[in-house]
Amino acid sequence: MLLTLDHLSKFYGDRQVLDDVSLTLDARQRVGLVGANGAGKSTLLKIAAGAVEPDGGSVSLASGVRLGYLPQTLDAPGDQTIADLLDAALGDLRALEAYLRDLEARMATDDGLDGIMAAYGEALERFERQGGYDLDHHQERVLQGLKLDHLPRTRTVGSLSGGEQSRLGLAVLLLQAPDLLLLDEPTNHLDLAALTWLETTLAAWRGALLVVSHDRAFLNRTVNVIVEIDEHTHAAVRYTGDYDAYLRAKAQARRRWEEDYARQQEEIRALRLEMNTTARSVGHNRPMDGDKFLRFHKKTRVQITVARRMNSAEEKLRRIEENPIPEPPEPLRFDPDFDPQDLKSHWPLAVSGLGRHFGARWVLRDVTFALGPRSRIVLTGPNGAGKSTLLRLLAGIDAPDEGSVTVNPQVRVGYLDQGQPFAETDRSVLDVYRDGTPGEEQHAITDLLASGLFRYEELRQPVRELSSGQQRKLQIARLIAARANLLLLDEPTNTVSFDVLEALEDALRAFPGPVIAASHDRRFIERFGGEVWALDEGRLVMQAAAIST
């Protein structure tokens, strides 16, 4: 085994993030680490890399194994140049090359030829595995693949953008060619071309891989094992296969849960029926024999039998009720408070000449379109292209600098912010959920619990104590409760666990009204089934082709 994580636990203050987590990685094994934000995935990587100490358990790295760790942000001095980082990354390989030349020289003069040849063979294998004979070309290929080849090597780390720093950290790690790669969200800040290049590179990687990623398509192309950190139990569950195999296993587990719950409910009904029937049967089993002693004896035997049956049924029912199988949550569903036919012959929303600038920079210019009653639009474009700005204008949160947004009076807009609008509040989950929603508190509790998004003990928890994934679930719950008939979604797949994400996508597919979603998630775009509109230098480019699932 290259890496063994044995019964790890970790606390931050009184909050436990990992509980009895064990994991092994062998050579050529590719493990995708998944779970809700705040579930402990990044913490587990840091422990494996030796950057954080666990509170319990142990970490074992096989002798001689070279480990490379990529955090979400590059940890390098700001005054260090790109050339400095690249030279440092290749330092071990340059030293290995010099060692090979030394061994070659000693072969002609030293007596211990067998030992020298053995050392030379081992060093040569490492040199070839790390791309030593193709070093300069390999370096250029990595920089080009990650869109860094245009940067002057004299640029300092501090002068680079956050995305450039992240890509540079990844490039340095790939050039080092460690035996074991630990990657924390490596697809952040990559465009489609760079992402495709990275997937191809990792698919051919000769070492082991442990990666945290929210990108389901990336996981399908790079891993052969999925490990899920449960956000409630903080334990790890292992699934063999890629993301699709994990999804099938989760679906099978859900079906078994539903079947087990249905069987238990049927057993409860049968036990209660048996108790009622047995109790009523006492009076219908009197012996008709004339002998009083015999009649008494038979009556006593009947009563003992009835009592045993009653006690047995009561004991079975008590055991079930002490530890019942919880009811599976209902599928997420957006239930708009309107008849979709009311908008059939009207435009729900129309935009004319829309413009928005920040200082001298125009983020949006002359954006014009009309939304149909069943329109399904995905907005794409790089970070900063104006996707979030456009959605905020459509939602009426911000005012345009030019043009207008006209919303049909029959339309109720539901908006999902990319950020965390409740992050600092001391109010409880239940109180924030009930904002602006009619109905009694108990009805709100029932709805929240039925959705499966929150457990009962979390309802009174202050929102500021929630992880980003839990806060995202609260946003989704409020969006569902709003019963809107037009949805504006800003990166809806961000920060939620995959089970919630898949359920959200299913709910959106069944939603009868129009939807506009800003997303860079390839899997979401494929499943969403709609037109793709790209924002390019402030202009909206409507794609002629639609994406369908």
Image (spheres, grey):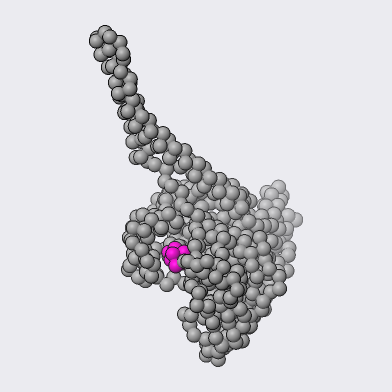
- Asked if one can make out residue 365 in the rendered structure from this viewpoint, the answer is no
- Give the dominant element type of the magenta stretch: helix, strand or loop: helix
Magenta residue span:
474-482
Residue 471: x and y in percent read: 43, 65
Is 32 part of what is drawn in magenta? Answer: no
Vertical side of 306 occupied by 370: above or below: below
Residue at (36, 58) in percent of width and height: 443
Q: Which of 12 and 397 is in front in this view?
A: 397
Horizontal arrangement in the rendering, residue 446 relative to residue 511 (left or right): left
Q: Nearer the viewer, residue 435 or 176?
A: 435
Residue most extreme to the top: 291
Horizontal arrangement in the rendering, residue 4 relative to residue 217 (left or right): left
Q: Nearer the viewer, residue 76 or 517?
A: 517
Residue at (36, 54) in percent of width and height: 456
Residue 57: x and y in percent read: 43, 49
- Asked if one can make out residue 396 in the rendered structure from this viewpoint, the answer is yes
Residue at (73, 55) in percent of width and height: 107
Q: Report which quarter residue 17 is drawn in.
A: bottom left
Residue most extreme to the right: 108
Vertical side of 13 occupied by 60: above or below: above
